Amino acid sequence: MTQTLHIDPEFKAQIPPLTQDERKQLEENILAEGELLAPILVWNGTIVDGHNRYEILQSHPEIPCSIRDLELETRDEVLVWICKHQLGRRNLTPEQKKFLVGKQYDAEKQADGFHGNQHTLPVLSAGVQNEHQQTPEKTCERIARENHISASAVRRAALFAAGVDLAEELCPGIRRQVLSGDLKAPDALFERLAKTRPEDYDALLEQIKNPQSRAKPAAKQKLFQTEKSASSKPLLASQPSESKPVPEETSSVYSQLADAAAAMQECWNTIFKQMPTLFTSPEQRKGVQAILEKHLAYLAALGFDLSGMTE
């Protein structure tokens, strides 16, 4: 390998880290082939995709380096490209996917600001649509649709990503631990870190680094009770005498459940549009009905009263 490429720390930070076994397997594959099967993608001499392959080649200069340039204009466009490319992978952890969605949203907002939006650019003729003319809200909704989540989940992902990056500044190395799944800290802590005052950084960072020391909230335990509970009322129903505010962590759980339900509905709607015979074919309707019955049985097993929903 003769060409020297530049590694941008911000670009590299968007790439989910390989485990030791994955890196070893990648090196063995490269050595077995004697070449790179996929080229290293670069922008202005800076690596965009292929950081791990490039680092492996440093120890094996006899293997030629295959390089391809990407035609992108700005750093933000490069960041958007990286996030979209990585989100296409199948082996992402939930933390990696949420981080990438948040980074893509932030990068697209920056790119929109650079190119202008619908309020700053001239109106195009009918039928012509420019992706960079979208407002942040429209960008948020599009990213949500592409990833089968809600718009609010995209905005929280941006806070999560900002919190992870801030935690990395305060404690180098923690981002890799979080994205690899080695450190299991509640997402809400990173969202709070992104919004809190500097004087509160240390306290939140300590909770992130030692999540096991935090007692499990009683409200969260109640949320996941099963039908074995003595009460037959819906688990989330509050008593008339209760006037306590909903804890922030419990509120985050509600949002996650709402996002999951919205994603399911959106996914089902997409499938039904693609296969309308699921409604018209008696045999296919039976299959759908069987799936729904299993889903309702699961909800009933959690202790929810579904009689009013199914009548």
Image: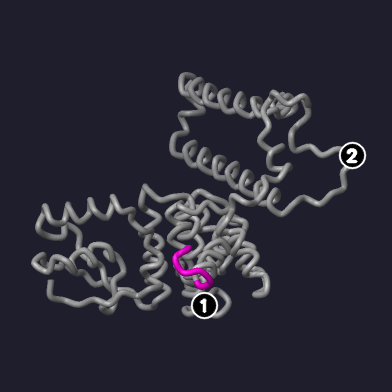
The quarter of the picture where the N terminus appears is: bottom left
The quarter of the picture where the C terminus appears is: top right
Q: Residues within 10 Å of mark 1 (few under 14, many from 20)?
A: some
Of tags 2 and 1, the one toward the viewer is 2
Query: Does any portion of residue 234 appear in the rendered image?
Result: yes
Q: Secondary structure at mark 2?
A: loop
From what the image shows, is residue 35 above or below residue 225?
below
Residue 42 in the figure: left or right of residue 96: left
Comparing 46 with 201, the one in front is 201
Q: In the image, residue 204 lies at what x, y percent?
A: 63, 63
Q: In the image, residue 155 lies at what x, y percent?
A: 58, 61
Question: Can you identify the residue that label 2 sits on?
Answer: 240
Comparing 114 with 61, the one in front is 61
Q: Residue placed farthest to the right in the image?
A: 241
**Residue 104 part of the magenta segment:** no
Q: Residues within 10 Å of mark 2 (few under 14, many from 20)?
A: few
Q: Residue at x 75, y 38 (%)?
A: 236
The disc placed on residue 147 is none
The disc placed on residue 113 is 1
Q: In the image, residue 190 lies at what x, y percent?
A: 58, 61
Figure disc tally: 2
The CA distance from mark 2 to mark 1 is: 48 Å
Q: In the image, residue 303 lies at what x, y percent?
A: 70, 27
Which span of residues is magenta-colored? Answer: 169-174
Q: Residue at x 30, y 53 (%)?
A: 20
